[in-house]
Image (spheres, rainbow, N blue to C red):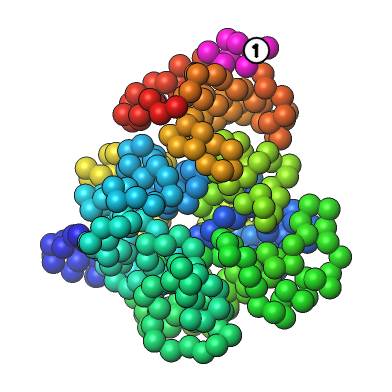
Amino acid sequence: MSRVFPLFLLAGSLLSSAAERPNVIFFMVDDLGWTDFGCYGSDFYETPNIDKLAASGMKFTNGYAACTVCSPTRASLMTGKYTPKHGVTNFIHSKTMKLKHEEITIAEALKEAGYRTAHVGKWHLAPRGVKDYKDYYPTHHGFDINIGGGHWGAPGSYFHPYQGKKAVENIPPGGKKGDFLTDRLTDETLKIINNWKAEPFFVHLAYYAVHTPVMGKPELVKHFADKAPGKVHKKPAYAALLRSVDDSVGRILAELEKLGIAENTLIIITGDNGGLMSQTRNAPLRAGKGSVYEGGVREPTIVRWPGVTPAGSVCDTPVITMDFYPTILKVTGAKGDAAHNKAVDGVDITALLRDPKAKLGRDNLFWYFPHKHGGGARPYASLRHKDMRLVKWFSDNRLELYDLKADISESKNLAKTMPEKAKELDAILTAWLKETNADTSRK
């Protein structure tokens, strides 16, 4: 359940003016491919508003999702922890896997500090097939408002009333035939921003797009169907669905400007896992969603912190989903829960946001996926150490080693030609698996 914090803490937090505590809007795009945005190299899709955002902020070339599928990454954002520590290790489709109430979410930490908190869009962190599944919805994890968040990971349809086998829950009454889900979520977000413009707020806008079922507004589908396809990206419906996300970002950025609060709002946009290979391509990265390789976890990541991030800057330092937990706490001045903070795996990246050449003092990032997936994954763990990437398959302890600086496409397995390096990194990975109590028994 969402925690009740001492009133004196809330009162003390509220004494600070809103201007001293920036608003935070976190855009999470579902199934986002690494090159889907124009500013990341798409040769067909159109994302002018997001490209403009990147030009006014910082673009990360080595941004990573915490997992190759959605729910674990979303739980890692909420908790700041690696997947084996919070226990959500697969997309949720069972009774046992869920975002546990004992976790202190980023929304709870910000709410304690006097922030208003809203979740809009996909949640997918509640258990499936149990009576109390709604007790794990956003309003039980620190959010004041939940628009569109339920236990399904995809909509039945992107068109009103967003029904099908998988219905979108918690959409306010209203709407008409032809209304588009991304637009509706944006409409609701704009209402929230307008209502809360005089006080600090945190909005987690988690688009269902660009997850299947891939469908776009007819006029946008026609626009892209009439356009010459790219060599890498070609599909009009996917391009239309992504363009609606870009239009949404543009509308929200314009509203912040109109309300005079854009300069006091931290903007973050990234994705939960790599692009789905049946719908997009992540080249030059290998594979995509549900795979062990870079295409499954490397994500476009853009941050704009007005007055701090140098406009048009590019940062090559690897960052990952969990880093946004301590970073948002630092930016907002929220303290969070001391015990929980000690267990957080993410690192504060505000130094990078000020100077893209700053050093984080971290060499290793880890991934853990003890499941099988149609994208090509079977139980594995992985490590990025500086520019080297190690993959370990649990079935036979086989190792794969890649030099990402020389071979971003992971086309040449160096495990046999660099056995000492593979052994060294395997020791680091094995120690991490032990430290996090990760189950490596699944074959």
Observer-nearest residue: 325 or 369? 369
Return the x and y of residue 184 as percentages of the image width and height: 50, 80
The image quarter containing residue 167 is: bottom left
Return the x and y of residue 5 as percentages of the image width and height: 16, 61
Name the residue at the front extreme. Answer: 165
Return the x and y of residue 389 as percentages of the image width and height: 59, 28
Q: Is residue 4 left or right of residue 383?
A: left
Q: Is residue 418 magenta?
A: yes
Q: Residues within 10 Å of mark 1 (few under 14, many from 20)?
A: few
Give the magenta part as a residue range: 415-423
* Residue at the (69%, 41%) spot, across then down: 285
Q: Is residue 110 above or below residue 327?
A: below
* Residue at the (13%, 62%) spot, across then down: 6
Count of residue discs: 1
Quadrant in which the N terminus is drawn: bottom left
Q: Is residue 185 above or below residue 212?
A: below
Q: Is residue 382 above or below residue 167?
A: above
Return the x and y of residue 106 as percentages of the image width and height: 33, 56
* Residue at the (21%, 49%) spot, across then down: 102
